[in-house]
């Protein structure tokens, strides 16, 4: 029998989902599992999203334009201009989720063997997208001791080779919740200008920033407008992860024309979800103000409880709804599995994501986990109590 492709063999499993079978077994055994492993909020999708598809009178769900519905693109362009991002509908390509947007971007900008520099830890699926595109991820490590701030520009400069095509960031960051400062964004702008690189910016968590932090978009710098590609999505902003509507935003006309050819090859993004997403853009600011207050409360609750656990290292994230925490264990992956297979408190346990899968450098993140504060504060308190009790008795504890 012929073997599978090298691409198939190197495609990584998701650390967010790889422990699902153990969670299923825990539930089958009668345990309740608090899911803090995945960015699936329990925040209600706004009513505006559902209004146009209730009792929808559409005799045929037809193919739509490959670039996405013009009315949706115009609506998003107005949204971006409200956020000081000067774009038109022609600068926006609607995709089937932010994932497709990233895959298209890598395939348009890079040939097989080209390189993209990404601060790690980073969203784990970047690794998979790079495999699909034949692109090499060149990681540069940020440190939990520094709150996962941008590594020094000098260290980024050292990673640049003739094969380097772009630097990619997620801002606010998944998995760390870090929000890049204006100074950090300016430093990235300058090195991209100096070295003639693209700057890819994943901004799906733009709406979720706390403690007075400023979200600075790479698209706020007109001097690099021709080399910025922004990735966005409705999934997190409107708590509509299953809608699978993302977008590529760029003022580089050649890039957008090429990306559209990839869009034509997959025909079009889903029509009904686009209609719902267009209406969601009209969600009032009060929705986001309430959601931000709720996420901040959840973050504060989780951080305070984690910091009270002996040996735990927990930065205070200022954006998104994740944090990466250092645990006093040898192998956080084993600990995460052990929580599901061997431990519970009164029939309840917790699922977290081992953080080593968010790094590309072997050996990093071995004692870290990503935790999503996507559950209500009562459930967060219960989950943190379970982790605290587990750390007291876990056989692989280091101190």
Image: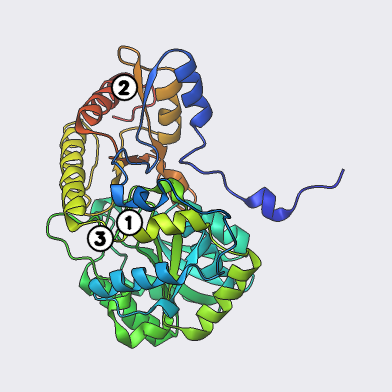
Which disc number belongs to residue 280? 1
Query: Do we see residue 79 in this rendering?
Result: yes
Residue receiving disc 2: 390
- Closest to the camera, between mark 2 and mark 3, is 3
Say which element carries label 2.
Answer: helix
Q: Distance between the Cα atoms at labels 3 and 1?
A: 25 Å
Query: Do we see residue 331 in this rendering?
Result: no
Q: Is residue 160 left or right of residue 65?
A: left
For label 3, count other residues whose C-alpha is less than 10 Å away and answer few (under 14), some (14-19) or many (20+).
many
Q: In which quarter of the image is the C terminus?
A: top left
**Residue 74 position within the rendered picture, expressed as x and y whole percent measured from the top left:** 37, 73
Q: Distance between the Cα atoms at labels 2 and 1?
A: 41 Å
Say which element carries label 1.
Answer: helix
- Closest to the camera, between mark 2 and mark 1, is 1
* Residue found at x 29% / y 56%: 148
Q: In this view, does 255 lie to the left or right of 376?
A: right
Q: Distance between the Cα atoms at labels 2 and 3?
A: 31 Å
Q: In this view, does 358 lie above or below 168?
A: above
Which disc number belongs to residue 179? 3
């Amino acid at each position: 029998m012929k073997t599978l492709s090298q691409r198939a063999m190197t495609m990584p499993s998701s650390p967010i989902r790889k422990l699902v079978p153990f969670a299923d077994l825990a539930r089958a055994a009668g345990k309740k599992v608090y899911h803090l492993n995945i960015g699936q909020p329990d925040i209600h999708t706004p009513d505006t999203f559902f209004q146009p598809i209730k009792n929808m009178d559409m005799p045929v769900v037809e193919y739509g334009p490959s670039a996405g519905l013009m009315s949706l693109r115009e609506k998003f362009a107005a949204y971006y201009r409200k956020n000081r991002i000067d774009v038109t509908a022609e600068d926006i390509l609607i995709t089937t989720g932010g994932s497709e947007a990233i895959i298209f971007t890598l395939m348009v900008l890079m040939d097989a063997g080209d390189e993209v520099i990404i601060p790690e830890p980073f969203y784990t699926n970047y690794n998979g997208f790079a495999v699909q595109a034949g692109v090499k991820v060149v990681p540069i490590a940020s440190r939990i001791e520094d709150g996962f701030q941008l590594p020094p520009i000098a260290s980024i400069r050292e990673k640049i080779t003739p094969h380097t095509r772009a630097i990619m960031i997620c801002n606010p960051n998944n998995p760390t919740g870090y929000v890049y400062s204006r100074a950090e964004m300016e430093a990235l702008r300058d090195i991209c200008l100096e070295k003639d690189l693209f700057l890819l910016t994943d901004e799906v968590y733009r709406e979720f920033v706390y403690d007075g932090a400023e979200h600075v978009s790479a698209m706020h710098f007109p001097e690099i407008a021709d080399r910025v590609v922004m990735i966005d999505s409705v999934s997190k902003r409107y708590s509509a992860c299953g809608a699978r509507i993302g977008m590529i935003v760029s003022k580089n006309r050649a890039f957008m024309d090429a990306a559209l050819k990839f869009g034509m090859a997959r025909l079009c993004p889903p029509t009904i979800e686009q209609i719902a997403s267009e209406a969601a853009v009209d969600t009032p600011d009060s929705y986001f103000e309430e959601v931000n207050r709720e996420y901040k409360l959840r973050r504060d609750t989780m951080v305070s409880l984690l910091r009270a656990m002996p040996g735990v290292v927990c930065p205070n994230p200022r954006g998104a709804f994740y944090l990466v925490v250092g645990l006093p264990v040898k192998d956080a992956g084993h600990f995460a599995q052990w929580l599901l297979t061997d431990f519970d408190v009164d029939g309840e346990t917790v699922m977290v994501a081992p953080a080593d899968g968010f790094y590309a450098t072997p050996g990093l993140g071995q004692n870290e986990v990503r935790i999503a504060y996507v559950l209500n504060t009562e459930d967060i308190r219960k989950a943190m109590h379970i982790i605290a009790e587990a750390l007291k008795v876990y056989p692989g504890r280091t101190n």
